[in-house]
């Protein structure tokens, strides 16, 4: 695979070719329509930051409505049950697409993948720019759904038809729903462009000596995520097109004969389950698209701050490949209660349980990395440890839901909400936080404040557990998800105190995020200047200037001699050997 | 900082586990034939996952504290790239654990979903619509009359809501109600239908859940084992009234059931 | 090429020496083109990379059609419950496609694929000769070949026009997009293919424009034509797939 090891000529040419575009001149070319992967990465980062605040604000409104349904809020006013469902739909969609997919891959992946493999830029810089601006358009279209007649759709982020396919099924299912689907279709196109670029860059632009098995685990995670995206988003796009046709052209892909409010619709013969199959064929890999980069970043940070090589590098790579591969064969576990053939549930269940194995390998290897290390507790490390803890907690509720038998009482209850929030929501967000604290010095040339960072960590860590752990109790008690009020069903009354506790926990956790933003912007302007390698880390991005020059290495091209995590090497001058240092010998 | 991590991770672990063991919030009392087996599988999974949870979290906290950077006095780090034997061991162990759990549970699933309802089962058709459940009993002839989407009128309720075609002789004795009555200890053969969007028929006490999907008539069976009133909830997002789409199932003795159905038939005449 | 240092100079990462960083503005500074002074672009590298990108892009297109195909098979095979008869029934009515016209269109597209291939080969030859031509004093004469690219564009547009005709005929036979699942899928597949093919036509026009308006060097032009050609061949293949699919699953 190591065709790069061949000779210097190729590498030189690479940097020439990629930077064939003119050096950035003027504000617009430099910061708006920039072709520089670093600027695009930062653009993605800020897009995700905006989106996460929107998404978080929506969740706050939901939590308030659940506990005080009658309250009259300033500006927002009185939240109706249908508004609650719109908030829920938009919260889920924005978080999944514009935060969990955008920040780790589009943001950090864009910025650091080329640098970590010693490339001067992405393989196709113009495509990279287009990908960002397409994502931006998708986000604007998504937000526009709030402001049209009827408001945002109420069909949930999974958009099950016929609810999502017929205009009269509820408020928000008119133009709002069309905008929602259009936005997702645009997002698909953007993600496909991004995925194509990531894969080509990883395969074709690695520096001399950067064999596949010397790539940092972050690069592996972005690479695998890109492959998942390439295969999954096309299918979602196809489903979105079919849904738009059902809504606007009167076709019947997903809609059988239905009567809404006594009104016979013109559809005939369609299959609502068809949408679920197509959606989850995308939807399950999407879960790994959200979490894999977090796994990569956690591995990188645990090793760096434990001052120890990562435990079982190859196993980590194979585990990620295994998770990605199996991820395409388990979509049916979202559909055990859907009316799908009960026989197929067997296969889906077994394959789903099989995913537990590579996930467990990763957890054990993270623990193995800490074992007998020399841990330095800077903020990124705290978030990485938090990631492992959340990954374990969220992961262990998986084997419940993966069994169709136990899915009978637990499906579509708060148990599921707790499960996926811990593992693909909060754990992935912890991965993003860890990455932010870890790479901020390289991206902005300054250090973030440690004190504020630690305060942010403790409040967020305890706060998120306080919000999402009780959801498992609610789910066991049979609390269905997506209920805007707990007043109607009698057995839910007992659960109101727990819901109230969660709302208070949400206030505190969301409050803690202000610490993060203040720290972020204050440090950007006033933080102490960062050295080139403030964490004594080994990967290639720490060899170049801070922040890196336009072509990443100032005309030089790095040559790689070592694996990515050579810490605590016996007999070395320092306790770490960088990837570009002379070889440490045949240690592995 | 290592000690703080140890303390907080352990605290979170023990508080969560405490609530899981003390279980003030738990599965509601099981009142169907399959509830015991499902609960057993649940508890087994629960204990196994609980052990893994406590072990993993505790060692995470412990390692964070024990292997913190103690300055120059600390022993050198263990320069190791892993241990293949150990990796194989835990890969095999987790594989066995997960696959074993899965196989254990699959028998219950097969009993629930592969076998058709007994011939003696009480047939009940459940129809979900925004935002109510309707229950139909076929009457003495044991046959459900045909329904016609063109006749559906939700505002009129009951028969008209599900579009019962009264010109069909089989429909004459069909009973449609908003509250479901079931005889105790007898299997029920549900036919689940939905007229507008997907709903999900969820009776927590009976450990029963199944989506009702437009364009499908899904057969499911359950055997209630205890007399009493139990709540039905909708578990699939179905629109703005999703939270209030609930119903009641009254499990009564066979005698009371027969009396009740006879009274409904009498009302129809 | 000696510009590459055998060992990359590592800056002292001893770290935390204050003031060591560049200005905090991102993306600034830096000499984008490297200092080598050896400005020749490596077009071979670039072509290979572009082809890899194309293969990945086509993978995404394939996944889109995988989605459509599985939807088609499921939609055809899965019956729907009919409340009025208390039975499951299928509502698939086979569609009458204007096969003759479709075969003519197919032929046009296949011929265009052929002309595209000639265009690709012509420009490959030209690009290979370019370095020789640039040697002062060497003259190979101006090769003015057949305008294969233009022919392909015209044939491509002809195909699209033919598809429009198919569309009109279907309308005349009262097969509308919402008539039944078979006609829905036929319109869907035709339209999606047409959109992709129109993209190819635009790419070809860009390739043509690149030569005489944008003054791109022949090697850069060749990359555009090469990628467009493979894309075009893929479109022909995709079209055959669609036709065969609609023949089997009517």
Image (spheres, coloured by chain):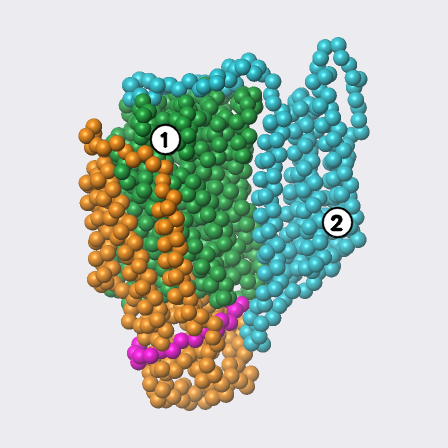
| Mark 1 or 2: the one toward you | 1
Q: Dividing the picture into quarters, in which one does residue C138 lie?
A: top right
What chain is tagged by disc 2?
A: C
Q: Which residues are magenta?
A: B213-231
Q: Secondary structure at mark 2?
A: helix
Residue drawn at (46%, 23%) of the image: A558
Residue drawn at (35%, 69%) of the image: B38
Above or below — where is A109 with respect to C87? above
Tell me which chain appears orange. B
Given residues A100 and C167, the one toward you in this image is A100
Q: Which residue is mark 1?
A: A566
Tell me which chain appears cyan. C
Tell me which chain appears green. A
Q: Secondary structure at mark 1?
A: strand
Is residue A330 in view? yes
Q: Which residue is mark 2?
A: C165
Q: Give the percent coordinates (x, y) of residue C222.
A: 68, 27
Above or below — where is A107 with respect to A281? above
């Amino acid at each position: 695979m190591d065709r790069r090891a061949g000779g210097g000529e190729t590498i030189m040419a690479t940097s020439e070719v990629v930077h064939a575009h003119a050096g950035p001149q003027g504000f617009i070319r430099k910061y708006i329509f920039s072709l520089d992967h670093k600027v695009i990465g930062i653009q993605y980062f800020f897009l995700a930051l905006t989106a996460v605040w929107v998404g978080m604000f929506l969740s706050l409104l939901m939590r308030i409505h659940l506990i005080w349904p009658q309250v009259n809020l300033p500006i927002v006013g009185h939240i109706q049950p249908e508004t609650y469902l719109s908030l829920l739909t938009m919260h889920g969609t924005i978080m999944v697409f514009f935060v969990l997919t955008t920040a780790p891959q589009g943001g950090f992946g864009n910025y650091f993948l080329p640098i970590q493999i010693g490339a001067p830029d992405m393989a196709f810089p113009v495509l990279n720019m287009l990908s960002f601006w397409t994502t931006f358009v998708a986000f604007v279209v998504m937000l526009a759904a709030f402001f049209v007649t009827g408001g945002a759709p109420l069909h949930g982020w999974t958009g099950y038809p016929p609810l999502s396919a017929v205009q009269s099924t509820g408020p928000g299912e008119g133009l709002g729903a069309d905008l929602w689907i259009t936005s997702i279709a645009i997002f698909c196109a953007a993600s496909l462009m991004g995925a194509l670029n990531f894969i080509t860059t990883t395969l074709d632009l690695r520096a001399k000596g950067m064999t596949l098995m010397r790539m940092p685990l972050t690069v592996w995670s972005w690479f695998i995520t890109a492959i998942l995206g390439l295969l999954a988003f096309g299918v979602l796009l196809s489903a979105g097109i079919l849904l738009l046709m059902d809504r606007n052209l009167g076709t019947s892909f997903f809609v059988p004969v239905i009567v809404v409010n006594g009104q016979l619709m013109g559809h005939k013969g369609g299959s609502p389950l068809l949408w679920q199959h197509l959606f989850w064929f995308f939807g399950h890999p999407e879960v790994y698209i959200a979490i894999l980069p977090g796994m990569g970043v956690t591995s990188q940070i645990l090793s760096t701050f434990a001052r120890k090589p990562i435990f079982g590098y190859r196993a980590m790579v194979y585990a990620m490949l295994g998770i990605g591969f199996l991820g395409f064969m388990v979509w049916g576990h979202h559909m055990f209660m859907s009316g799908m053939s009960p026989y197929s549930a067997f296969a889906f269940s077994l394959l789903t349980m099989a995913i537990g194995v590579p996930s467990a390998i990763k957890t054990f290897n993270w623990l193995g990395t800490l074992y007998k290390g020399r841990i330095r507790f800077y903020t990124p490390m705290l978030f990485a440890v938090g990631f492992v803890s959340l990954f374990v907690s969220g992961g262990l509720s998986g084997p419940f839901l993966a069994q169709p038998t136990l899915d009978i009482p637990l499906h579509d209850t708060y148990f599921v909400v707790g499960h996926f929030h811990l593992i693909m929501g909060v754990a992935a967000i912890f991965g993003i936080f860890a990455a932010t604290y870890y790479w901020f010095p390289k991206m902005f040339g300054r250090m973030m404040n440690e004190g504020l960072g630690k305060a942010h960590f403790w409040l967020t860590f305890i706060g998120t557990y306080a919000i999402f752990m009780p959801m498992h109790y609610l789910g066991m008690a049979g609390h269905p998800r997506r209920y805007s009020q707990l007043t109607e069903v009698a057995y839910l009354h007992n659960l109101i105190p727990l819901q109230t506790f969660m709302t208070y926990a949400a206030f505190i956790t969301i409050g803690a995020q202000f610490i993060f933003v203040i720290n972020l912007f204050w440090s950007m302007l006033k933080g102490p200047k960062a050295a080139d390698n403030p964490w004594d880390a080994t990967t290639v991005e720490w060899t170049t200037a801070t922040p890196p020059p336009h072509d990443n290495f100032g005309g030089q091209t790095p040559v790689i001699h070592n694996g990515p995590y050579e810490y605590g090497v016996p007999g070395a001058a320092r306790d770490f050997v960088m990837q570009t240092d002379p070889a440490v010998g045949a240690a592995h | 900082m290592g000690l703080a991590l140890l303390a907080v991770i352990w605290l979170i672990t023990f508080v969560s586990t405490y609530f899981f063991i003390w279980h003030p919030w738990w599965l509601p009392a099981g009142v169907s034939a399959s509830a015991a087996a499902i609960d057993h599988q649940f508890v087994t999974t629960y204990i196994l996952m609980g052990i893994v949870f406590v072990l993993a979290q505790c060692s995470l906290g412990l390692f964070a504290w024990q292997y913190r950077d103690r300055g120059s006095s600390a022993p050198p780090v263990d320069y190791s790239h892993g241990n293949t034997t150990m990796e194989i061991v835990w890969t095999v162990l987790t594989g066995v654990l997960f696959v074993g759990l899965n196989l254990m549970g699959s028998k219950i699933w097969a009993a629930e979903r592969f076998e058709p309802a007994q011939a003696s089962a009480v047939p009940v058709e459940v129809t979900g619509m925004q935002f109510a459940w309707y229950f139909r009993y076929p009457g003495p002839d044991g046959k459900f009359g045909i329904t016609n989407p063109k006749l559906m009128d939700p505002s009129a309720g009951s028969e008209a809501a599900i579009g019962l075609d009264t010109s069909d002789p089989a429909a004459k004795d069909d009973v449609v109600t908003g509250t479901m009555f079931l005889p105790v200890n007898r299997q029920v053969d549900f036919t689940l239908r939905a007229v507008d969007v997907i709903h999900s028929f969820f009776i927590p006490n009976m450990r029963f859940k199944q989506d009702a999907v437009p364009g499908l008539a899904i057969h499911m069976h359950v055997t209630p084992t205890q007399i009493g009133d139990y709540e039905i909830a909708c578990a699939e997002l179905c629109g703005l009234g999703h939270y209030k789409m609930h119903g009641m199932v009254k499990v009564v003795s066979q005698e009371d059931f027969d009396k009740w159905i006879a009274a409904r038939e009498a009302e129809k005449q | 090429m000696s510009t590459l240092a055998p060992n990359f100079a590592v800056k002292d990462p001893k770290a935390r020496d204050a003031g060591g960083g560049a200005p905090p503005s991102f993306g600034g500074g830096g000499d984008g083109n490297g200092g080598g002074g050896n400005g020749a672009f490596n077009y071979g590298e670039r072509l290979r990379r572009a082809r890899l990108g194309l293969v990945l892009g086509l993978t995404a297109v394939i996944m889109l059609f995988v989605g459509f195909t599985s939807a088609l098979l499921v939609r055809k095979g899965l019956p729907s419950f009919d409340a009025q008869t208390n039975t499951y029934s299928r509502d698939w009515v086979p569609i009458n496609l204007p096969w003759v016209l479709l075969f003519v269109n197919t032929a046009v597209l296949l011929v265009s694929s052929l002309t595209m291939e000639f265009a690709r080969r012509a420009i490959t030859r030209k690009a290979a000769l370019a370095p020789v031509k640039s040697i002062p004093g060497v003259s190979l004469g101006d090769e003015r070949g057949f305008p294969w690219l233009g022919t392909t564009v015209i044939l491509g547009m002809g195909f699209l026009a033919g598809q429009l005709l198919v569309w009109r005929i279907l309308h005349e036979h009262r097969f509308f997009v919402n008539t039944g699942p078979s006609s829905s899928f036929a319109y869907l597949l035709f339209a999606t293919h047409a959109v992709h093919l129109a993209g190819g036509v635009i790419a070809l026009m860009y390739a043509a424009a690149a030569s005489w308006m944008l003054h791109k060097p022949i090697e850069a032009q060749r990359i555009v034509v090469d990628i467009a050609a493979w894309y075009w061949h893929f479109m022909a293949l995709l079209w055959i797939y669609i036709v065969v699919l609609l023949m089997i699953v009517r």
